[in-house]
Image: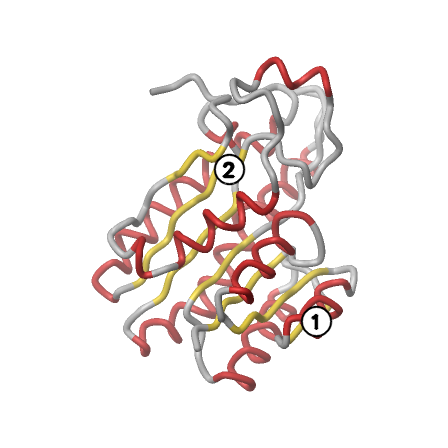
């Protein structure tokens, strides 16, 4: 059995990823601050931890729980909420610092904990759920755009560093997804004319973790209904 860690697994895309992986036979170790990850883990036969991606100790608990139950970690899905939003220069230093903690440092900290385990196994795969706006910035969420662009750089650096160890890292870039309320005003921006389904994001994440994606690393895969204009 392969085993995946999933952060932000209490709701939305994180919970959808947990359900999809469990349906494909993965063991899942889930983290969220609300306690809902523990409930979902119990439902899926996995293990759950109530805690924050901002706390290294909580990430360590997640790793330890997976190792205690299964003795291995094959995949990681990182999923977090949105950093603070607001007008570009009205956002405070504290807002920007929170964005760094929530979007980049959570991945860095978990990578420090899980990568040595994957190195010993000789394999592993990561999927960081990012945003379509990482490379086409949108003033609706400036901190998210800036930090997730940085996450793209980190993923490429990590992929280069650990490719020979058999470890892959990719970012998944969703568009507007139905895990949040649909805003009719945004639909004309989306060529497919609808929000994506959290389940569609989850299936893509599961593919990127799978051996079928074994030659894909260091990439940023848009799953956005065509909303980005770059080619």
Element on which disc 1 rests: helix
- The residue wearing badge 2 is 148
Pick the front one: 99 or 200: 200
Coordinates of residue 81 in the picture (x, y in percent): 67, 45
Pick the front one: 72 or 18: 18
Coordinates of residue 75 in the picture (x, y in percent): 44, 64
**Considering the image in quadrants, where does the N terminus appear?**
bottom left
Residue at the image position 53 percent from the left and 36 percent from the top: 174
Residue at the image position 38 percent from the left and 60 percent from the top: 125
Pick the front one: 202 or 38: 202
Front position among marks 1 and 2: 1
Instruction: Identify the mark at residue 177; answer none if there is no mark.
Output: none
What is the count of numbered marks? 2
* Image height of 40 relative to 94, above or below: below
Q: Earlier in the sequence, mark 1 or mark 2?
A: 1
Label 1, label 2: how far apart the Cα atoms are: 32 Å
Q: Quadrant of residue 9?
A: bottom right
Residue at the image position 62 percent from the left and 29 percent from the top: 195
Coordinates of residue 36 in the picture (x, y in percent): 76, 62
**Considering the image in quadrants, where does the C terminus appear?**
top left
- The residue wearing badge 1 is 43
């Amino acid at each position: 059995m392969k085993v995946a860690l999933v952060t932000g697994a209490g709701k939305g895309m994180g919970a959808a990823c947990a359900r999809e992986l469990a349906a494909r036979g993965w063991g899942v170790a889930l983290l969220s601050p609300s306690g809902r990850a523990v409930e979902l883990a119990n439902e899926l036969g996995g293990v759950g931890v109530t805690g924050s991606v901002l706390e290294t100790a909580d990430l360590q608990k997640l790793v330890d729980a997976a190792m205690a139950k299964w003795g291995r970690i094959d995949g990681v899905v990182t999923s977090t909420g949105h950093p603070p939003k607001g007008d570009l220069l009205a956002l405070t230093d504290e807002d920007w610092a929170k964005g760094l903690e929530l979007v980049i440092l959570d991945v860095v900290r978990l990578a420090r904990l899980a990568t040595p385990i994957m190195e010993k196994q000789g394999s592993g795969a990561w999927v960081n759920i990012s945003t379509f706006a990482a490379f086409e910035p949108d003033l609706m969420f400036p901190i998210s755009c800036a930090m997730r662009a940085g996450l793209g750089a980190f993923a490429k650096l990590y992929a280069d560093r650990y490719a020979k160890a058999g470890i892959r890292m990719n970012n998944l870039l969703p568009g507007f997804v139905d895990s949040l309320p649909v805003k009719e005003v945004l639909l004309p921006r989306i060529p497919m004319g609808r929000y994506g389904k959290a389940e569609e994001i989850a299936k893509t994440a599961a593919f990127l973790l799978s051996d079928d994606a074994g030659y894909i690393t260091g990439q940023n895969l848009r799953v956005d209904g065509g909303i980005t204009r770059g080619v």
